[in-house]
């Protein structure tokens, strides 16, 4: 079996023990062949001799990659989706070009299937080779990760709440200090308890790393964690109402700390290591290769749409070049084509349609990607967001740098601008709160609820406000 790994070479070392041959291609030092282009045509000659049985594309956390010309690779294709919650807004289009999607968040695999994308859950895993077994516990409580209240408000609120209650926390800020994987596992092994917080209700990598390191994972509870880790002898879960009580109780019980730590490490080593994931992946590969069903057809529009979204967020120039090379410069004659690809409009429009006129002004007069006409751009994004929201989509308002879906971010910015207007203030505040509650971002919602409460302290809203107070860490 010949396996081609594209972009991030996830599970490469473990897969090499199972498959006949592995070739990894991408912009990472671990790759066999360095490749930093978005066009697979550039490596077509390199793949002629290799002739892969299957290609596995893995999304990287720091640089989402959309490859053009997927039809260059004439074998079945698997996409390993990392940070699916954050990236769903563009993946839901691009991944229609793949035969199978393996999703790190089980609930998102259901959403992919609902979009017509064949998907299975594929949880993240602990790197078992990095586990350090240490009897020395230097820290009572540790936390490793980005620590910036402008980017991770809830995380900052949780830590501040614990510090104000008298807890000493060893914080290693992933922004201020670059921490290698070896150092992460070392700090975890030297800690009695490690704090875990999720931007979204999910199963993040930190959870598996903490549990595998022989310490207590003290994690914010959510439905997925409650489903996959029901046993309180494996993990300690908290919410806004019991976080301080549970932490004080566990710190006073050294026997309980040892019991949970040992149980968790044993459970992770037996079930959730990279070795286990590679074994599972090899079974999926075998089944897909043997299937009689034809490869999924490649549709350029799916790739173009994903690139448009990613360009709006990251401004990667290669995406803009590829879009314009395939669609031509934005002009009056092909405006309908672009809007159709964007999925924002059903044609033909009426000549006096304000929606069409705004798009025309943004795309034709300012060309793709420019935002000189911010008022019109925000209005268009607002309408787009409302359309999606009314259709029942759980949208991402983009309140942090990492999660900003450009379509939702602009609408969120627009609502914030409307708050400054007396005419629309109450309506805009309610809309923002509604969106934030729908994705369970309660502490952010509470911030806006405080403003609305002072503006209009109605009985109906007081009920919502009290609920947010209970759910928030503020």
Image: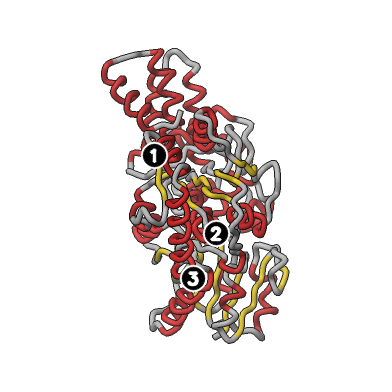
Q: In this view, does 267 lie to the left or right of 215?
A: left
163 or 276: which is nearer to us?
163
Q: Where is residue 410 in the image (x, y as percent from the top left)?
A: 52, 34
Residue found 45% across the figure and 38% down from its top: 248
**Is residue 295 depicted above or below 377 in this figure?**
below
Quadrant of the rendering where the N terminus is positioned: bottom right
Residue found 31% across the figure and 19% down from its top: 462
Residue occupied by mark 1:
239
389 or 180: which is nearer to us?
180
Residue 277 image label: 3
Q: Is mark 1 on a helix, strand or loop?
A: loop
Tell me which label, 1 or 2, sits earlier in the chain. 2
Residue occupied by mark 2:
213
Q: Report crowding for label 1: few under 14, some 14 to 19, many 20 or more residues within 10 A (C-alpha).
A: some
Question: How far is the residue under mark 2 from the one under mark 3?
Answer: 18 Å
Q: How many numbered marks appear?
A: 3
Tell me which label, 2 or 3, sits earlier in the chain. 2
Residue found 44% across the figure and 52% down from its top: 255
Which label sits in the foreground, 1 or 2? 2
Q: Is mark 2 on a helix, strand or loop?
A: loop
11 or 54: which is nearer to us?
11
Question: How far is the residue under mark 1 from the one under mark 2?
Answer: 23 Å
Question: How far is the residue under mark 3 from the one under mark 1?
Answer: 30 Å
Q: Report crowding for label 3: few under 14, some 14 to 19, many 20 or more residues within 10 A (C-alpha).
A: many
Which label sits in the foreground, 2 or 3? 2
Is residue 184 something one can see in this rendering?
A: yes
Q: Are marks 1 and 2 in contact (CB under 8 Å)?
A: no
Residue found 36% across the figure and 53% down from its top: 232
């Amino acid at each position: 079996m010949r396996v081609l790994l594209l972009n991030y070479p996830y599970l490469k070392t473990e897969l090499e023990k199972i498959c006949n041959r592995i070739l990894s291609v991408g912009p990472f030092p671990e790759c066999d062949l360095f490749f930093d282009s978005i066009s697979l045509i550039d490596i077509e000659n390199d793949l002629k001799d290799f002739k892969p049985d299957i290609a596995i594309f893995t999304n990287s956390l720091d640089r989402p990659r959309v490859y053009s010309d997927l039809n260059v690779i004439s074998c079945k294709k698997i996409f390993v989706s990392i940070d699916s919650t954050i990236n769903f807004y563009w993946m839901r289009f691009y991944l229609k070009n793949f035969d199978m999607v393996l999703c790190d968040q089980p609930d998102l695999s259901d959403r992919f299937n609902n979009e017509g994308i064949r998907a299975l859950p594929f949880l993240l895993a602990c790197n078992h080779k990095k586990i350090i077994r240490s009897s020395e516990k230097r820290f009572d409580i540790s936390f490793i990760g980005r620590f910036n209240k402008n980017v991770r408000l809830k995380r900052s609120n949780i830590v501040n709440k614990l510090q104000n209650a008298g807890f000493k926390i060893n914080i290693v800020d992933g922004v201020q200090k670059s921490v290698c994987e070896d150092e992460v596992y070392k700090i975890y092994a030297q800690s009695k308890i490690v704090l875990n917080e999720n931007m979204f209700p999910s199963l993040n990598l930190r959870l598996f790393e903490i549990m595998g390191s022989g310490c207590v994972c003290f994690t914010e509870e959510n439905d997925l964690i409650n489903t996959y880790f029901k046993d309180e002898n494996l993990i300690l879960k908290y919410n806004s109402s019991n976080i301080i009580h549970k932490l004080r109780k566990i710190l006073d019980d050294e026997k309980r700390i040892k019991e949970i730590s040992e149980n968790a490490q044993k459970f992770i080593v037996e079930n959730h290591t990279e070795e286990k994931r590679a074994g599972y992946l090899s079974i999926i590969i075998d089944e897909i290769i043997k299937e009689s069903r034809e490869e999924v057809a490649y549709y350029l529009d799916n790739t173009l749409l994903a690139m448009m979204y990613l360009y709006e967020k990251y401004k990667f120039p290669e995406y803009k070049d590829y879009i314009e090379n395939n669609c031509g410069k934005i002009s009056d004659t092909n405006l309908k084509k672009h809007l159709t690809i964007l999925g924002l409009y059903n044609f033909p429009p009426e000549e006096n349609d304000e929606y069409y006129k705004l798009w025309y002004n943004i795309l034709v007069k300012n060309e793709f990607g420019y935002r000189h006409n911010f008022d019109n751009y925000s209005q268009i994004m607002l309408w787009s967001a409302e359309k999606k929201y009314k259709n029942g989509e759980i949208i991402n308002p983009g309140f942090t740098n990492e999660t900003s879906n450009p379509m939702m971010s602009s609408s969120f910015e627009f609502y914030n601008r409307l708050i400054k207007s007396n005419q629309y203030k109450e309506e805009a505040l309610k809309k923002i709160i509604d969106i934030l509650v729908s994705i369970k971002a309660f502490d952010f919602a509470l911030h806006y609820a405080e403003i609305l409460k002072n503006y209009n302290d109605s009985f109906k809203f007081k009920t919502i406000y009290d609920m947010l107070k209970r759910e928030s860490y503020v």
